[in-house]
């Protein structure tokens, strides 16, 4: 991913699916106006911190990666109303936490 992509402060939607990404730079927090982010069908096994800064994020697609856990700050994004985690080998603890959160939040969380 070119570093200049983080110099787009008014970026609203970004589709990085099917790019064989195995890591994400920690600078994701710079996309504070981002509303939709599609990271599906990559090779992500760890997500960086900084998700709490993405206060405009409404939709996050993380389908079919290699995630066993996610940063809990993702669940604190107030505008998030859709989170897709299907196709990830989530740990039993993470899966349980997400199931509990799903019953209490206004967020659609899709799991296998």
Image: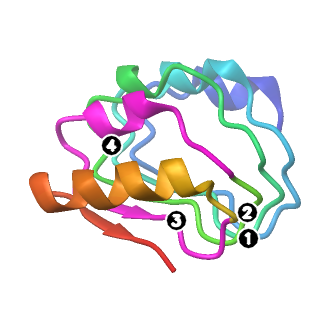
Residue 14 seen in the current view = no
Nearest to the eye among marks 1 and 2: give it.
2
Quarter of the view holding residue 46: top right
Crowding around mark 3 (Cα neighbors within 10 Å: few <14, some 14 to 19, many 20+) is many
Find residue 41 and name its label: 1
Compared with 36, 86 (above or below) is below
Q: Is mark 1 on a helix, strand or loop?
A: loop
Q: Give the residue number, with chain letter if any, for mark 2.
A: 65
Residue 65: where, in percent of width, then height?
A: 73, 63
The segment highlighted magenta reads 68-88
Q: What element carries label 4?
A: loop
Find residue 85 and name its label: 3
Answer with left or right where residue 88 lies relative to residue 1: left
Counting residues from the start of the chain, the first of labels 1 and 2 encountered is 1
Q: Is mark 3 on a helix, strand or loop?
A: loop
Q: Do the residues labelled 3 and 4 touch (CB within 8 Å)?
A: no
Q: Give the residue number, with chain letter if any, for mark 4.
A: 57
**Cα gap from disc 1 to disc 3, whole angstroms:** 11 Å
Counting residues from the start of the chain, the first of labels 4 and 1 encountered is 1
Answer with left or right where residue 39 lies relative to residue 24: left
Q: Do the residues labelled 1 and 2 touch (CB within 8 Å)?
A: yes
Residue 79: where, in percent of width, then height?
A: 19, 42
**Cα gap from disc 3 to disc 4, whole angstroms:** 16 Å
């Amino acid at each position: 991913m070119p570093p200049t992509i983080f110099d787009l402060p008014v970026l609203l939607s970004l589709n990085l699916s099917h790019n064989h990404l195995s890591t994400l730079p920690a600078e994701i927090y710079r996309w504070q106006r981002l509303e939709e982010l599609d990271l599906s069908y990559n090779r992500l096994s760890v997500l960086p911190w900084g998700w709490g800064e993405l206060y405009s994020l409404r939709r996050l697609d993380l389908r079919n990666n290699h995630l066993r856990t996610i940063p809990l700050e993702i669940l604190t994004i107030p505008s998030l109303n859709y989170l897709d985690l299907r196709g990830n080998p989530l740990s039993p603890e993470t899966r349980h936490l997400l199931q509990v959160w799903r019953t209490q939040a206004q967020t659609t969380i899709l799991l296998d």
